[in-house]
Image (tube, rainbow, N blue to C red):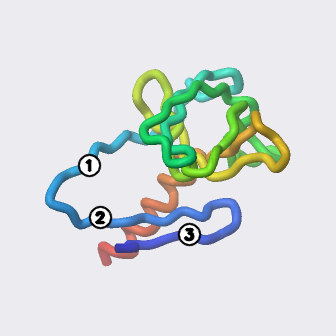
């Protein structure tokens, strides 16, 4: 069930409610004021590219801002078909962002929505549903 979404071009995030007979594991988002997310930081990318289940790759943050606005995280790893929507995880177990796109004509550059943007949308959607 779609609880809410933000379809602005820089966001493109949906909040879903999954009805199931079991609980699913979750990852905490990186703290908002976290100074441990920086260019050069190594991350773990989890995904299911090309229908291969549970793959993990290492990536390094190569850029955090676009025109002085922190709207994306660029990593030196391609976002393969099936990886979009998967988390970027740092060594403390926090989700730094969610993978969403690959750079056209590049096998080594991908992009992710940062955790602060996810938190912003989550807070907005939950505030609307609690009224």
Give the side of residue 129 with respect to residue 115, left or right.
left
Cα distance between the residues tagged 3 and 1:
23 Å
Query: Mark 3 vs mark 1: which is more N-terminal?
Result: 3
Q: Which residue sits at x=65%, y=44%?
A: 79
Q: Secondary structure at mark 2?
A: loop
Indicate the position of residue 91 as horizontal and vertical percent values.
Answer: 46, 22
In front: 60, or 53? 53
Residue under label 1 = 24
What residue do we see at 59% from left, 46% from top?
99
Task: Judge whether 128 appears above or below 104 on screen.
Answer: below
Neighbour tally class for label 2: few under 14, some 14-19, many 20 plus, Cα within 10 Å? few
In the depicted structure, whether residue 131 falls above or below residue 35: below
Report whether 54 appears left or right of 81.
left
Residues under labels 1 and 2: Cα distance?
9 Å
Dot 3 falls on a residue whose secondary structure is strand
Does dot 1 land on a helix, a strand or a loop? loop
Residue lying at the far left of the rendered structure:
21
Q: Position of residue 93 (x, y in %)?
A: 40, 29
Residue that carries the numbered disc 2 in the rendered image: 18
Q: Earlier in the sequence, mark 3 or mark 2?
A: 3
To which residue does mark 3 refer? 6
Q: How many marks?
A: 3
Judging depth in this view, the residue of 45 and 74 nearest the camera is 45
């Amino acid at each position: 069930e779609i609880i809410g979404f933000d379809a602005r071009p820089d966001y493109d995030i949906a909040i879903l409610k999954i009805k199931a007979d079991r609980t699913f594991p979750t990852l905490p988002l990186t703290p908002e004021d976290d100074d441990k997310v920086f260019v050069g930081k190594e991350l773990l990318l989890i995904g299911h590219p090309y229908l291969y289940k549970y793959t993990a790759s290492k990536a390094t943050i190569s850029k955090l801002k676009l025109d002085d606005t922190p709207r994306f995280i660029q990593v030196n790893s391609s976002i393969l078909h099936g990886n979009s929507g998967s988390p970027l995880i740092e060594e403390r177990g926090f989700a730094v962002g969610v993978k969403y796109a690959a750079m056209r004509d590049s096998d080594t550059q991908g992009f992710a929505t940062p955790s602060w943007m996810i938190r912003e949308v989550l807070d907005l959607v939950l505030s609307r549903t609690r009224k």
